[in-house]
Image (cartoon, rainbow, N blue to C red):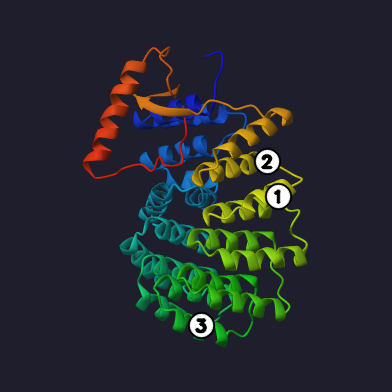
Amino acid sequence: MPVRNEFSWSTMISAFSWSNRLEDAIAVYEMIPDPSVVSRTAMFTGYAQNGGIHEAINSASWAALISAFAQSGQSEEALKMLSELHKSGMVPSDSMFTSALFACANIGALEMGRQLHSLTVKAGCQCNSYVGNELISMYAKCRNLENVLQVFNTMRVRDTVSWNSLISGLSQNNMLDDARSIFEKMPRRDVVSWIAMISAYAQTGQGHLAFELFLDMMASGVKPNSSTVTGFLVTCGSLGARKLGKQIHCLIFKLGLDADVFVGNSLIAMYCKCGCKDGFWVFDETYEFDIVTWNTILIGCAQNGHVGGSGRSQEVDERSGVAKEPGISWIQIKNKLLSFVNGDKRQDHIEEVYTILKEFYGRLREVGYVPDTNFVSS
């Protein structure tokens, strides 16, 4: 092959492994100049399939791979790798347990999470604060409050993350009074503690309590950063809490965060979602723009029926050198990934693409899904 990429390397490794030709798979792997996660995973799997699990341990880090899968949203793969490791007779490390529990939380795998909990007890690492905190988060996301409290109460050492995880868990299960009680008992609060409680109030429509707690946080000396303010504005926009959003807007000036492009984008989005024209004023006063800024104001114009605003933004786009690009989508046909643009009829497989899309839309209609196209203008 004149050009080899990680896909071709990993395909060769997998092919040799499935054919019980482990030595050939190893030879291919050793030819790779800079092995990626994909190729390392293929080699790991090859070792496991051919009974060479201990050799795999020497070639790369299981913990790093399990963590990479979990953090990239490939939760099933992360859990599969941990299962292979356990079947080989090896005991997972603390970091492997935390990554696997994170994966369970992402996909709501409560039963698998319980099995991992039992393994942590057998391995003697349930007392590790990182493992304990991840257990609390996992049970909370799986809506198992009994185990959330059980893990927290049996922890020998509780750090701020432990308390924050408990507060978030109680809030997620609509136990705000209990969450607030725990919040008040915390020996030490960081910005995450405050925001967890504030967000819980905001998400349940108790904006006045959320803002009061926000002011208490400021008075305690804990200053919110741009990420904190952005998250709070997103909550205000989702709830349509315009008054609360305006109060936060005033605080943004006092905190000196008004020049932050991310905060500015969140302000525009919040006002537009609340149906307030102040979003256009924020846009006019913005000195730094990115693609999110343009998309936010254009969507805001369309959602609120300000078609003229879209034209005005187009004029500014032209002066700024921002070019509109066609929206590209992807579809898999016969194990091949194809790209297409709406209205394009030049693709070799375009008839198959449209056939599959029509079938897909038909299924959506059958289950009662109707897309919201009110903000789409021709």
Tell whether label 1 touches label 2 (CB within 8 Å): yes
Secondary structure at badge 2 equals loop
Secondary structure at badge 3 equals helix
Cα gap from disc 2 to disc 1, whole angstroms: 8 Å
Can you give x and y, in whole percent of width and height, for residue 210 in the image?
56, 74
Can you give x and y, in whole percent of width and height, for residue 315 in the image?
67, 31
Q: Name the residue rendered at 63%, 52% in the picture.
A: 279
Dot 1 alpha-carbon crowd within 10 angstroms: few under 14, some 14 to 19, many 20 or more = some
Query: Compared to 89, does 328 lie above or below?
Result: above
Secondary structure at badge 1 equals helix
Cα gap from disc 2 to disc 3, whole angstroms: 38 Å
| Residue 246 in view here | yes
| Residue 125 in view here | no
Q: Amino acid at mark 3?
A: Arg
Task: State the residue position of label 3.
Answer: 180
Of labels 2 and 3, earlier in sequence is 3
Q: Amino acid at mark 2?
A: Asp
Q: Name the residue rendered at 39%, 69% in the picture.
A: 139
Q: Amino acid at mark 1?
A: Val
Foreground of the two, 70 or 303 = 303
Query: Compared to 198, does 92 lie above or below?
Result: above
Q: Name the residue rendered at 44%, 61% in the picture.
A: 101
